[in-house]
């Protein structure tokens, strides 16, 4: 693919974000850097192709219909797909066909649906285990705006994932509540992660941080960052 104006724009934005991650890691005294997942929702498959040429290895989607179509179109492209949106149990069969991870598991019923779906998919294709992140609500009020399981339910969901064939317990995911201090939110998430690791030591993943709050996420131990608009720009106009 020849370089075009869009590729140059993506390259510049990607470079800026990588510098932010590096600076945040240094400021946090970290020797490691979180994995960057570029959130490509609403953007065309051609943008994923461009990102791969720029060295991106992981992309995130939050709608199964869109993700399934893009991953099918890009079947020959070496990129890992991560499902990060709210997932209905009846979409489990579709998601396991393309997703390396599901980062929005928030209830036991979804664990059961994914276990059943991954068993069938592994029998048919031999695919690897599905990595599972438990989405935790950090909202203080009931029925928080950003979704996720109550922190008190995390251990039970984790136990179910750990016991399920074909599912790997990767860790936890959260979105900072609207209007809340992201540092306080991600400090709380770090505590939830510590409690989970006491029971499941291998569940080290913390998927946290988006364009507006990645520095706070890095400070409090995020292992995965989900960055969309600061790399891809605003949602494309329809029509």
Image (cartoon, rainbow, N blue to C red):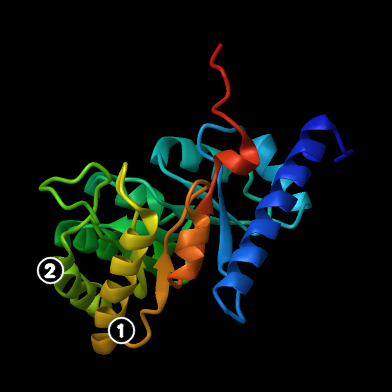
196 or 52: nearer the viewer: 196
- Among the two numbered marks 2 and 1 on one chain, the one whose residue lies closer to the N terminus: 2
Provide residue 221's location: percent of width, then percent of height. Answer: 45, 73
Q: Residue sitting at 85 percent across and 33 percent down?
A: 4
Q: Residue sitting at 42 percent across and 73 percent down?
A: 205
Q: Residue 108 falls in which quadrant of the image?
A: bottom left
CB-based contact (under 8 Å), mark 2 and mark 1: no
Provide residue 165's location: percent of width, then percent of height. Answer: 29, 76
- How many residues crowd around disc 2 within 10 Å: few (fewer than 14), some, or many (20 or more)? few
Res 127 seen here: no
203 or 29: nearer the viewer: 29
Q: Looking at the rendered structure, which numbered label has been put on residue 219?
A: none
Answer with left or right where residue 66 lies relative to residue 233. Answer: left
Q: Looking at the rendered structure, which numbered label has been put on residue 152?
A: 2
Q: Is residue 230 above or below residue 78?
A: above
The quarter of the rendered structure image containing the N terminus is top right
Q: Residue 116 falls in which quadrant of the image?
A: bottom left
Q: For mark 1, what is the residue? A: 197
Q: Residue sitting at 23 percent across and 41 percent down?
A: 145
Res 39 seen here: yes
183 or 2: nearer the viewer: 183
- SS under mark 1: helix
Q: Residue 102 falls in which quadrant of the image?
A: bottom left
Provide residue 53's location: percent of width, then percent of height. Answer: 78, 51
- How many residues crowd around disc 1 within 10 Å: few (fewer than 14), some, or many (20 or more)? some
User: Residues under labels 2 and 1: Cα distance?
Assistant: 15 Å
């Amino acid at each position: 693919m020849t370089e075009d104006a869009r590729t140059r724009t993506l390259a510049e934005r990607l470079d800026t974000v990588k510098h932010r991650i590096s600076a945040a890691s240094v400021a946090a005294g970290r020797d490691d850097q979180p994995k960057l997942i570029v959130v490509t929702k609403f953007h065309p498959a051609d943008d994923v192709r461009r990102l791969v040429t720029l060295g991106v290895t992981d992309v995130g989607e939050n709608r199964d219909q869109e993700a399934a179509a893009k991953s099918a179109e890009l079947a020959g492209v070496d990129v890992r797909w991560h499902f990060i949106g709210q997932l209905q149990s009846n979409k489990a069969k579709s998601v396991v066909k393309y997703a390396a991870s599901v980062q929005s598991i928030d209830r036991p019923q979804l664990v059961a649906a994914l276990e059943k779906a991954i068993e069938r998919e592994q029998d048919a294709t031999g695919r690897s285990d599905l990595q599972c992140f438990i989405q935790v609500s950090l909202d203080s009020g009931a029925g928080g705006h950003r979704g996720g399981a109550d922190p008190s339910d995390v251990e039970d969901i984790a136990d179910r994932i750990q016991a399920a064939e074909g599912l790997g317990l990767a860790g936890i995911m959260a979105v900072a509540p609207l209007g809340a201090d992201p540092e306080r939110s991600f400090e709380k998430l770090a505590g939830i992660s510590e409690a989970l690791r006491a029971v499941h030591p291998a569940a080290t993943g913390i998927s946290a941080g988006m364009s507006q709050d990645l520095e706070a996420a890095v400070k409090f131990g995020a292992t995965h960052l989900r960055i969309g608009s600061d790399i891809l720009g605003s949602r494309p106009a329809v029509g």
